[in-house]
Image (tube, helix red, strand yellow):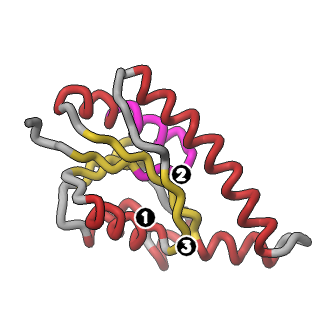
Amino acid sequence: MGLFNRILVPVDGSGYSLNAVCLAARLGRIHSSDMRIFHVIDDALLDQLTRFSKKGRESVREELMRNAQAFLSNMRCKMHEEIITTSEPIIREGVPHEVILEEAQSWNADLIVMGKLGRRGISHILLGSVAERVIEFSDIPVLVVK
């Protein structure tokens, strides 16, 4: 048994997330870990996009889901390059750091590996980044990848 039996990898489609997937895959191979790639559609982002779009909320949600499925598929392929078998990527909706922590707990993850996700500018000052919140409230180790 390795040190990390279950590694949760929350992703947002950024380059940071891709780096996190690659590192998590290498760690997973070393520790013979189960891997789970995970994405959260941010409720606040969904609300903002709907507000500024001529599309309805459901149309915006479907577009976000399609985009997420596309980059999740790409990231899953990166894990397979490291000869890591993963379950199907998961997409949930909610407040990202809360949903990530809920998933880690319900799946009994031993490690969370995530890219430097988050907000910039005034949103960062007021709300902090997703990675900061996950680190702050997590009961398990969190590895943040640049």
Q: Quadrant of the N terminus?
A: top left
Q: Which residue is mark 2?
A: 12
Residue 53's label in the rendered image is: none
141 to 13, vertically: above or below: below
Q: Residues within 10 Å of mark 1 (few under 14, many from 20)?
A: many
How much space separates mark 2 and mark 1, taking CA atoms? Answer: 10 Å
Q: Are marks 1 and 3 in contact (CB under 8 Å)?
A: no
12 to 84, vertically: above or below: below
Residue type at mark 2: give it. Asp
Q: Which residues are magenta?
A: 10-23
Q: Is residue 72 visible?
A: yes
Q: Which residue is mark 1?
A: 130
* Residue drawn at 41 percent across, 37 percent down: 21
SS class, disc 1: helix
Q: Which residue is mark 3?
A: 123
* Marks 2 and 3, the one that precedes in the sequence: 2
How much space separates mark 1 and mark 3, taking CA atoms? Answer: 11 Å
Q: Residues within 10 Å of mark 3 (few under 14, many from 20)?
A: few
* Marks 2 and 1, the one that precedes in the sequence: 2
* Residue drawn at 25 percent across, 54 percent down: 142
SS class, disc 2: loop
